Amino acid sequence: MPPASQSHLVLIPSYNTGPKVVETVRQVRQYWNPVWVVVDGSDDGSGEALLTLQATDPGLRVFVLPENRGKGGAVFYGLRQAVCHGFSHILTMDADDQHPAASVPDFMLASERAPDAMVLGKPLFDESAPQLRVRGRRISNWWANLETLWGGIGDSLFGFRVYPARALLTIMSSNRWMRRFDFDAEAAVRLAWAGVPILNIETPVRYFLPSEGGVSHFRYVRDNVLLVWMHTRLISGFVARLPALVWHRTSSLK
């Protein structure tokens, strides 16, 4: 097992992902230490399975929330704990084994070399990716890039990324949004507004069929309505910040 990092932590929010979350954790633990999981009100037995795994793995810590708070809410809980324990960066990833555990060290190394930056995964889709979702995310990406004046967000929705912990905590503590499916995109945009540099790393992603144990809580209408509301909020913030964004972009091009 790798030695324990004192600065960089893998944080995995999980909601009813069944055996996949245990599989994910076991894979990630081969590449990184420590790994934390926030069980977000799951009622599928995955919390109990993770607690059993924790009992024999000192590099794993499991938090079990009594109610579902949403992806962003689970990350927010873990983020606050991470900062309290002295971690400077968190790498977030999905619990359903879609994100490549083997890429964790590369992302952490990139973050260590540029500690002020957020390191964003830019997904490389294969034939397993639902084309409706692949096409749909292009719309969100276009809006996120408009809201940052094309500041460099390679993909706004991909949840495999490293955040500077205190910068993210400041942003999440200052508003009541970013608690559900809107977390990933809004976090990237608001951190860019705060002047956090962006690094993009291309990363393979795999979607699993239900027969392979794949679990998805994405709901096309509900979550797209949430994204529309999120971008409506962000556009309002973009307009207010437009002079500062133009000045910053102009200055960076000189």
Image (cartoon, grey):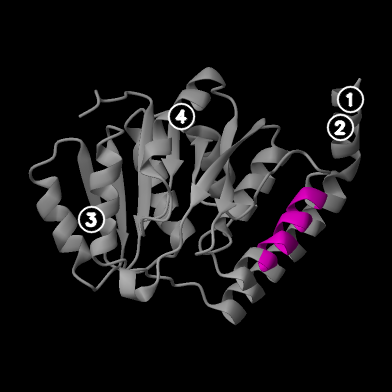
Q: What residue sits right under mark 3 in the picture? A: 22
Of the pair 104 and 75, the residue shown nearer to us: 104
Instruction: Return the residue at label 1.
Output: 253
Q: Nearer the viewer, mark 4 or mark 1?
A: 4
- Nearer to us of marks 3 and 1 is 3
- Mark 4 Cα shell of 10 Å, populated few (<14), some (14-19), many (≥20): few
Magenta residue span: 135-146
72 is within the stretch colored magenta: no
Residue 209 at x, y percent in the picture: 40, 71
From the image, tell me which residue sits under label 2. 249
Tell me the quarter of the picture where residue 168 sits.
Answer: top right
Which mark lies nearer to you, 2 or 1?
Answer: 1
Number of the label disc, if any, that sits on residue 193: none
The residue under label 3 is which amino acid type?
Answer: Val
Q: In the image, what residue type sits under mark 1? A: Leu
* Nearest to N terminus: mark 3 or mark 2: 3
In this picture, is 126 found above or below 167?
below
Residue 106 is marked as 4
- Tell me the SS state at disc 3: helix
Q: CA distance from mark 4 to mark 3?
A: 22 Å
